Amino acid sequence: MNRQRITRRRALGLIGITAACGLSGIAALLPRSPAPRVVILPTDTPAPTLGILPRAAWNARPPNHNARSERGFYGAANPFGWRDYGADYPDIYRTLVLHHSVIYRFDDLTTLRDVQDLHMNDRGWADVGYHFLIGTSGQIYAGRDLRARGTHVGGFNTGSVGVCLLGDFTQRDPLPAQMDGLLALGRWLMTQLPELTHVAGHSDFNPETTQCPGRLRLRLGEVAAALGLLHGTEGYQAPT
Ligand SMILES: [Zn+2]
């Protein structure tokens, strides 16, 4: 498996997007066993070297599996339920999808709870939709467990890591410290998720419905280059 991962990354670097799509297409044909029906406890994705603040540090609510829109657990009869990738999660993720929170109230911790409340109360999701959030000082916060599918990019959540920078970048640029935090997180994710090939903005996938992540869209090529990834949606693979 490791050899396959290395080969795909190396191929992406050498022969570019067209070939990458071909390789991805081959991978898409490989059968995957269905995700086990396992409840993920609200533990945090471990990353001690990055100093990711755990959910408890921002008083996150636990996931609600009776949520209105993301009710119950994923299966053939419930495709929008909470999807636990289980031990296969490193093989699932292909794309880093970036967002801005738009809302920002008082400080990071208040805003994190506001974002989670928005997602759980208003959108009816089981938990905050993003896997990681980055505060104004570059501090990284744990969001949804990385072993679970996020809810942040309509129609393209499977295999997409959701990262949200706190703030409204409609008119202004993300803060330099936030960009530093994003790159640090990205580099760590590259070590954890060997199938990651692309970085995209939310609006790359959903251009009709959002301009998220605002002016961060102007930096996506730079972020991708810094991480050794490609910018765009071509890495996405439809769920199997
Ligand atoms: Zn977004």
Image: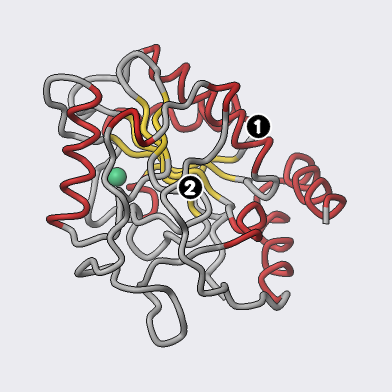
Q: Is residue 174 above or below residue 59?
A: above
Q: Amino acid at mark 2?
A: Val
Q: How is the image coloured?
A: secondary structure
* SS of the residue under disc 1: loop
At 30% from the left edge and 53% from the top edge, which residue is drawn?
A: 127
* Label 1 with label 2: CB-CB less than 8 Å: no
Q: Mark 1 to mark 2: distance in Å?
A: 16 Å
For residue 14, which quarter of the picture?
top right
**Residue at the disc numbered 1:** 228
Image spot of residue 64 (x, y percent) = 28, 60
Closer to the camera, 232 or 41? 41
Neighbour tally class for label 2: few under 14, some 14-19, many 20 plus, Cα within 10 Å:
many
Q: Amino acid at mark 1?
A: Gly
**Residue at the disc numbered 2:** 161
For residue 175, which quarter of the picture?
top left
* Quadrant of the drawing holding the N terminus: bottom right
* SS of the residue under disc 2: strand
* Quadrant of the drawing holding the C terminus: bottom right
Neighbour tally class for label 1: few under 14, some 14-19, many 20 plus, Cα within 10 Å:
some
Q: Earlier in the sequence, mark 1 or mark 2?
A: 2
